[in-house]
Amino acid sequence: MSYWKEKVAVITGGSGGLGRALAASLSAAGARVVLAARDPEKLERVAAQLTSHGGEVLAVPTDITRQEQVDALFLRTIEQFGRLDVLVNSAGRSTRGQAIDTTPEEFVELMNLNFIAAVRCTRAAIPHLLKSKGHIVNISSLAGKAAVRYVGAYPATKFALNAYSQQLRLELSPEGLHVLLVSPGPIARDDSELRYADQVAGLPETAKKPGAGVKFRAIAPEKLSRAILAACERRRAELVYPAAVRLLFALGQLSPRLGDWLIRRLT
């Protein structure tokens, strides 16, 4: 029997990208999936697709930057399924721009979506996840390990998520909760060349590319989602993808000057 059979997973950002791929992988493995995102039409399309393949899916339109909607999401989940085994904090977005040109208000806006919203969802989910000794999966980025150029406030938000994930591991792992931090490189998207077209004025042409021009091949979300499920089953603390860049991070910790040189070479 699949490890995921009849487990209940809430996935924020479930209407597209990696969130959608994770929903498909979990559903195919037998999990019951709750999709959360702001766009009801996109949510319903994904839910209908998964249901047509035999999945058990609940779509809950949710703005995770609003506490009352987060509370309603988890209330609906428990009313529908009676339990919670997995929370995937996948919702978020990147930006383009230089850090010095990014206003405090823009930092606050992105921090609210990429970090504070994950805190909201985690706090709402914790009582149920402790009962099931379940999983929290926080989707971070390589930019949460080593900052890169031309992505504005994005690395700061992911560094915060990384620290929060470690705190959760230290505090709650003894109670049986598994916390997985996922730090992937650029994830392939059909619209990757268009997403930042209105934000790259004055920046190098490569800034509009995935990862703002990081020299890594874009990762297929379906492949990454399978790796995430395997890491959860092994209850790993972290998944860095591609794994080879861990050496870069280690060198950057030993010598920040060398780390900066390597990042410039790789972008």
Image: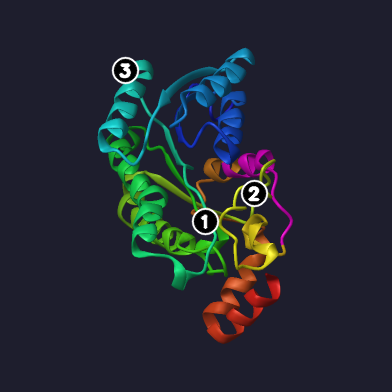
Circle 1: residue type = Thr
Report the residue at 62% width, 13% height from top: 52
Up-down: is 110 above or below 7?
below
Lower position in the chain sequence, tag 2 or tag 3: 3
The residues tagged by marks 2 and 1 sit, at their Cα atoms, a distance apart of: 14 Å
Lower position in the chain sequence, tag 1 or tag 3: 3
The answer to if 221 sits in the magenta stretch is: yes
Is 3 on the left-hand or right-hand side of 262?
Answer: left
Q: Which residue is mark 3?
A: 79
Report the residue at 30% width, 54% height from top: 171
Q: Main secondary structure of the magenta part?
A: helix
Asked if residue 5 can be seen in this view, the reply is: no
Up-down: is 6 above or below 198?
above
- Colour mode of the rendering: rainbow
Circle 3: residue type = Glu
* Element under disc 2: loop
Front residue of this view, candidates 210 and 125: 210
Up-down: is 95 above or below 134?
below
The residues tagged by marks 2 and 3 sit, at their Cα atoms, a distance apart of: 34 Å
**Stretch of the chain drawn in magenta:** 216-228
Q: Which mark is residue 173?
A: none
Percent from the top left, x then y, of residue 231? 57, 46
* Element under disc 1: loop
Between label 2 and label 1, give the one nearer the viewer: 1
Report the residue at 46% width, 69% height from top: 101
Lower position in the chain sequence, tag 2 or tag 1: 1
Q: Which residue is mark 1?
A: 95
The answer to if 81 sits in the magenta stretch is: no
Between label 2 and label 3, give the one nearer the viewer: 2
Quadrant of the drawing holding the N terminus: top right
Q: Which mark is residue 187?
A: 2
